[in-house]
Amino acid sequence: MARFNIDTCAMLVEFSASQWTARRLDRNTSEEVVLRKGAAAKDAARVNKHLLAGRKELEVINQKVGAARTYVYDNTLPWSDSGTRLLPTKRFNEFNSRMMQFESDFAQSVNEFVDVYPSLITAQAMALGDMFNRSEYPEPHTIARKFGFYLNYMPVPKAGDFRVDVGNEAQAELQAKLSALADQRVEAAMQDARERLKAHLERLMKQLHVEVGPDGKERKGKIYDSLIEGGVELCDLLESLNLTNDPLIEDARKQLRSVLNGVAIDDLRKHASARTEIRTQVAEIADKFNF
């Protein structure tokens, strides 16, 4: 791979969120199940009870976190096994603004949950019956600490900055290993971009396929708005995610963008000929680039 300055065109992103799960192991019920089923091993069954069973207030927060996590993964590339992601610098302003909105929405949902939390405990005393145990619920004044939204940006490490007192030869070896690791991670990130494009090409071909059954009737897959909208968004996103300016990714995304531009979703739903035409063009792109 040709050398280029990854540290100037991208940065690292760490995102995580902490949440109260409202789930606890119910030892008594677990033992009852084991005895009732005649299991020899005491740990043959583990019953986890949902402390807020039947309530939706906590699920709202879970959905906010899920949406933020999906956005991070959709708009960044993989970097390390620890979950750190690679963000192109040209996407920083848009990305950071969106994440700040996610954090604000998360904080608002947490505040709303904290406000009603005491009343939820009271309600669960009746909902859980004999399974209710007040000591399993955090105190109202501490429940807010169970939630957190964490976003951190870091520069991509440079091999030339690896300076330790281990001797010139050893230091050169360490710098070479760091450079090789960076190259491997960049290639893995680019492969992720290729796989995204490949997956959508395959999805398009599958959903646009028209099959004529033995009875002569056409069988067509259901067309969702996201099939075309998602493809257009992916093509636009790949323009900035293509950190190495891979000509295959760039040419493929341009060609797919051109095919999808102006496609009327209703035409695809109504007319088999429209499906076949677009599918043929998509198949040509898939065959040409063969990711």
Image (tube, rainbow, N blue to C red):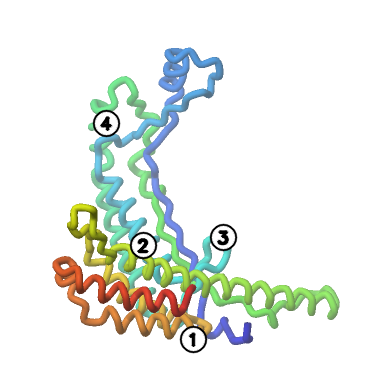
Gap in angstroms between the C-alphas marked 4 and 2: 29 Å
> Residue 110, can we see it?
no
- Residue 247: mark: 1
SS at mark 1? helix
Residue type, label 2: Ala
Tell me which corner region of the image, top left, top right, bottom left or bottom right, holds residue 188: bottom right
Q: Nearer the viewer, mark 4 or mark 3?
A: 3
Q: Earlier in the sequence, mark 4 or mark 3?
A: 3
Looking at the picture, how far across and down is residue 203, in whole percent?
A: 35, 65
Looking at the picture, how far across and down is residue 163, in whole percent?
A: 74, 78
Q: Which residue is mark 4?
A: 124
Gap in angstroms between the C-alphas marked 3 and 1: 30 Å
Q: Which residue is mark 3?
A: 82
Left or right side of 271 for 284: right
Looking at the picture, how far across and down is residue 114, in whole percent?
A: 29, 47
> Residue 35, can we see it?
yes
Local crowd size for mark 1, using a 10 Å CA cut-off: few (<14), some (14–19), many (≥20) = few
Q: Nearer the viewer, mark 1 or mark 2?
A: 1
**Tag 4 near tag 2, CB within 8 Å:** no
**Tag 3 near tag 1, CB within 8 Å:** no
Q: Earlier in the sequence, mark 2 or mark 3?
A: 2
Q: Earlier in the sequence, mark 4 or mark 2?
A: 2
Local crowd size for mark 4, using a 10 Å CA cut-off: few (<14), some (14–19), many (≥20) = some
Residue type, label 4: Gln
Q: Which residue is mark 2?
A: 68
